[in-house]
């Protein structure tokens, strides 16, 4: 995605018109249009002001993806009670069918003991509760390169 498209998507997601953004930044509407069409680029100071106006970091502004932002907001706005009702394995299995079939092939008990040891180690060493230890271990696994 181009920077211009990212700027456009971020502006739209924030509910501003080009005129409103131009007024807040002290530039012309045409300047905003040129940025969004990739004809010119905002300087770093204007980029920082845009990120504050749109409530995103500079990194997010550069790679703004409306779908990702909507998913993030949906997750943030979902209550803990609603999240507990979701069968996450079934939901993810629609995208990753292996989640519904691996139990037939994998000796799960062989891995449960090892994973339990890792979780306990995280809980003891860093004083994490069960949920935090699980999240940390999940994140570590996600960063493991193959």
Image (cartoon, grey):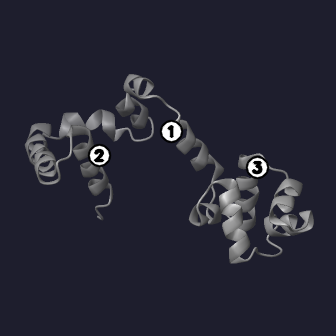
**Mark 1 or 2: the one toward you:** 1
Depth order, front residue of 28/70: 28
Whole-Å distance between the Cαs marked 3 and 1? 20 Å
Task: Tell me if residue 88 comes above or below residue 34 in the rendering.
Answer: above
The answer to which quarter of the image holds residue 106 is top left
Task: Tell me if residue 112 comes above or below residue 19 in the rendering.
Answer: above
N-term mark: 1 or 2: 1
Query: From this viewpoint, is residue 2 visible?
Result: no
Q: Residue at image x 35%, y 33%? A: 89
Whole-Å distance between the Cαs marked 1 and 2? 16 Å
Task: Tell me if residue 65 comes above or below residue 15 in the rendering.
Answer: below
Tag of residue 12? 3
**Label 1 environment density (alpha carbons within 10 Å; few <14, some 14–19, many ≥20):** few
Tag of residue 135? 2
Residue holding disc 1: 76
**Residues tagged 3 and 1 counted as in contact (Cβ below 8 A):** no
Q: Locate residue 57, reporting x and y percent.
A: 58, 61
């Amino acid at each position: 995605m181009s920077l211009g498209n990212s700027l456009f998507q971020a502006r739209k997601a924030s509910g501003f018109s080009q005129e409103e953004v131009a007024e807040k930044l002290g530039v012309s509407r045409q300047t905003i249009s040129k940025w969004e069409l990739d004809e010119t680029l905002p300087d770093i100071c204007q980029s920082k002001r845009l990120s504050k106006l749109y409530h995103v970091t500079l990194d997010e502004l550069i790679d703004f993806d409306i779908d990702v932002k909507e998913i993030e907001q949906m997750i943030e706005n979902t209550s803990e009670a609603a999240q507990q009702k979701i069968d996450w394995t079934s939901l993810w299995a629609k995208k990753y069918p292996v989640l519904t079939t691996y139990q037939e092939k994998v000796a799960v008990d062989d891995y449960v003991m090892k994973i339990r040891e890792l979780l306990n180690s995280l809980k003891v060493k860093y004083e994490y509760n069960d949920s935090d230890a699980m999240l940390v271990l999940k994140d570590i696994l996600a960063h493991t390169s193959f």
